[in-house]
Image (tube, rainbow, N blue to C red):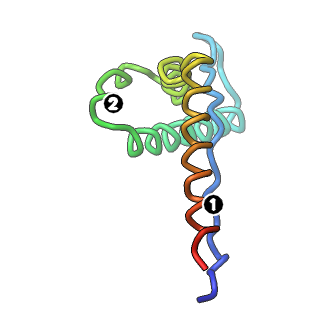
Amino acid sequence: MASDNSYVQPAIPRFDGVAESAPGVVLSEAEQKKLEERKLKDLKAKNYLFQAIDHFILETILQKDTCKQIWNSMKKKYQGTTMVKRQQLQALRKEFEILHMKQGGVC
């Protein structure tokens, strides 16, 4: 069986947030268009996040305005301690060694 290497990873949007113009400041047409494009990109990124997030977590982040705020909130919640990360890495190494031994033992 030949493997198909035609998989293309989708572009991951950047989570920069959208800076609003100060009240009373009049933007030029080009600046307004650029601001609207950035808002649209932000909405698309929020949509991607909402589609990928469990409903329980979704309820906690619905009050966030931008994808940057959502991302930072999730990052803070799921960052984990160093000890937890080490334990996860150790478990993955053990699983890899077991799989490696299974593959090496079959002739």
Residue 30 image point, x, y percent = 71, 38
Say which residue label 2 marks. Answer: 58
Residue 75 lies in what quarter of the image? top right
Give whichever of 59, 17 is nearer the camera. Answer: 59
Q: Position of residue 54 (x, y in %)?
A: 33, 37
Which of the image's four quarters has the C terminus?
A: bottom right
- Residue 102: which numbered mark, if any? none
Question: Badge 1: few (under 14), some or many (20 or more) residues near its Cα, within 10 Å?
Answer: few
Residue 63 pos. (x, y %): 36, 19
Of residues 93 and 6, which is closer to you in this image? 93
Number of numbered callouts drawn: 2
* Amino acid type, callout 2: Leu
Q: Amino acid at mark 1?
A: Gln
Mark 1 falls on what kind of element? loop
Residue at numbered disc 1: 9
Q: CA distance from mark 1 to mark 2?
A: 25 Å
**Place of residue 67 in the rendered image (x, y in percent of width and height, measured from the top left):** 52, 30
Relative to 82, say whether 92 is above or below.
Answer: below
Residue at x-position 54% and y-position 22%:
84
Q: Earlier in the sequence, mark 1 or mark 2?
A: 1
Does 15 sit above or below residue 44?
A: above
Picture layout, residue 42 above or below residue 8: above
